[in-house]
Amino acid sequence: MKFNREELLKKQEEYEQQSQKYFEETTREIALVNYSNELIRFYRRVPIQMAKKRPDLWDVASELSPFVLEYLIEWIRLHDHNRKIKFWSVYVLPVLEKRMATYKRGKTGVSEEYQKLKDKYPVDQLAEQYTKLGKVMNGKRKGLCPLHKDTDPSFTVYLESNSFYCFGCQQGGDTITLFRMLNEEYNE
Ligand SMILES: [Zn+2]
């Protein structure tokens, strides 16, 4: 049997392409195994029937890493495309794509969410579950600090910026910071 040179080169090229393909597939599979827990959580958390009625459930997408998001988007585009009944592309894809866009824009999306969340809960209302606050004076409310053993009111809530600062223990922040600190304090 005789091979000519060109044929050999062609075979060689084919072989290289094939190995490159296998290599890429394997790398991808390894990465996927690493992220599989995240994926399992995603699929489990969202029962299809419920998700149709309650698109807000897809907020679970906010917990996904960019890699998993990208993978899911690709998967949906590929698989849902050939289905008679479209589900993923209708209900899920827009949410995932929106989330992906947020990642690409950088941190702005995240801080918007954060802003929304903290504006929803006034600091003084949260603080009052743990301490007594005085009346509003110059846009401030003062009370004994729920974060340290306070003797005179050094805990100050600034209503306009919805933030707090304690002149005793020198801790401050927004509602979310306070919530976190209070939970640490009272769980110890
Ligand atoms: Zn304090």
Image (cartoon, grey):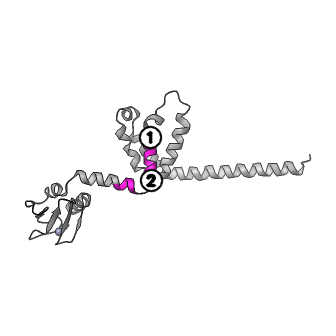
Instruction: Identify the main secondary structure in magenta.
Output: helix
Residue 40 seen in render: no
Asked if 143 appears above or below 5 in the picture, the reply is: below
* Residue with the mark numbered 1: 94
Q: Is mark 2 within 8 Å of ligand 1?
A: no
* Residue with the mark numbered 2: 103
* Residue kind at label 2, given as amino acid type: Tyr
| Callout 2–callout 1 Cβ contact below 8 Å | no
Q: Is residue 47 left or right of residue 118?
A: right
* Residue kind at label 1, given as amino acid type: Pro
Instruction: Give the Cα distance between marks 2 and 1.
Output: 14 Å
Asked if 83 appears above or below 146 in the picture, the reply is: above
Residue 77 at x, y percent in the picture: 53, 39
Residue 43 at x, y percent in the picture: 43, 41
Residue extent of the magenta highlight: 93-111
Query: Which residue is farthest front?
Result: 138
Name the quadrant where ligand 1 sits.
bottom left
Q: Quadrant of residue 153?
A: bottom left
The residue depicted at 34 percent of the width and 53 percent of the height is 112
Q: Is residue 10 left or right of residue 30?
A: right
Residue 55 at x, y percent in the picture: 37, 37
Front residue of this view, candidates 167 and 24: 167
Q: Residues within 10 Å of mark 2 (few under 14, many from 20)?
A: some
Q: Quadrant of residue 1?
A: top right
Q: Quadrant of the C terminus?
A: bottom left
N-term-proximal mark, 2 vs 1: 1
The residue depicted at 67 percent of the width and 49 percent of the height is 21
Which element carries disc 1, helix, strand or loop?
Answer: helix
Give the tally of numbered discs. Answer: 2
Query: Which residue is farthest right?
Result: 2
The residue depicted at 52 percent of the width and 27 percent of the height is 84
